[in-house]
Image (spheres, grey):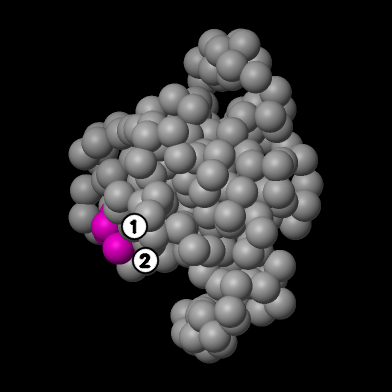
Amino acid sequence: MIYEIRTYTLKPGMIPEFEKRFEASLPARLKYSELAAFWHTEIGPLNQVIHVWPYEDLQQRADIRPRAAREPDWPPKADDLLLAMESGIYLPAPFSPKLGGGQKLGNIYEMRIYQFQPGTIPKVIERWAEALKGGRLNLSPLAACMSSDIGLLNVWIHIWPYADLNERERVRKESMKLPTWPPKTREFLVGQQNKILAPASFSPMA
């Protein structure tokens, strides 16, 4: 499986209008494949929407996208709202849950985006697999964990759901008491960023 993460930066104040148009057009797109998640940013870089599309592989993506584009209602008519568009292809870690599927995991999601040194992602996956066995998942679930394959390389994304920001603060404090957390990957880090995301009403991860 692969995930395509599409990040759109909108003109200020245009998230409600974009989500309205996207939701109206979405049934035409869902004829071809599922949507895993749709979020907008609340904290971090503002005026962004993030939609995640799972595919079996790159060939399925290549087959579906031109077919969907022939639908009169897809993509949403929203060019007047857009400032920038980014897309990346990601590979789920062997221990990652499947993103999407309609389950409600939280009211907010934290997307943490780490850049690692070239060639270190296999070691990162190995250390994360070991660290997750040490009790972190007893505090709150992991929504997804993945590494970049196409786009900006050596990127590691992990996504955590929470009931609210208070729960996030509590869980993070508790996790720091664990001897195995955070995973011992700091020596490979180049950069870190995070985004607090809220799901759209139509998101499968609502």
Left or right of 94 in this view: 97 = right
Dot 2 amino acid type: Asp
**Which residue is the site of mark 1?**
86
Magenta stretch: helix, strand or loop mostly = loop
The residue lying at 77 percent from left, 40 percent from top is 104
- Residue 198 at least partly seen: yes
Q: Which is nearer the eye, 103 or 131? A: 103
The residue lying at 59 percent from left, 34 percent from top is 198
The residue lying at 54 percent from left, 17 percent from top is 172
**Which residue is the site of mark 2?**
149
Left or right of 204 in this view: 157 = left
Q: Which is nearer the eye, 109 or 126? A: 109
User: Is 200 located above or below residue 6 in the figure?
Assistant: above
Q: Which is nearer the eye, 113 or 14? A: 14
x%, y% of residue 89?
A: 42, 65
The residue lying at 70 percent from left, 32 percent from top is 106
Can you say which quadrant of the picture contains the N terminus? Answer: bottom right
x%, y% of residue 171?
A: 61, 17
Is residue 117 within the magenta segment?
A: no
> Looking at the rendered structure, which numbered label has been put on residue 166?
none
User: Is 186 located above or below residue 17 in the figure?
Assistant: above
Q: What stretch is highlighted in magenta?
A: 151-155
Dot 1 amino acid type: Glu
Left or right of 145 in this view: 150 = left
Q: What element carries label 2?
A: strand
Marks 2 and 1, how far apart at CA = 14 Å
Q: Is mark 1 on a helix, strand or loop?
A: strand
Q: Are marks 2 and 1 in contact (CB under 8 Å)?
A: no
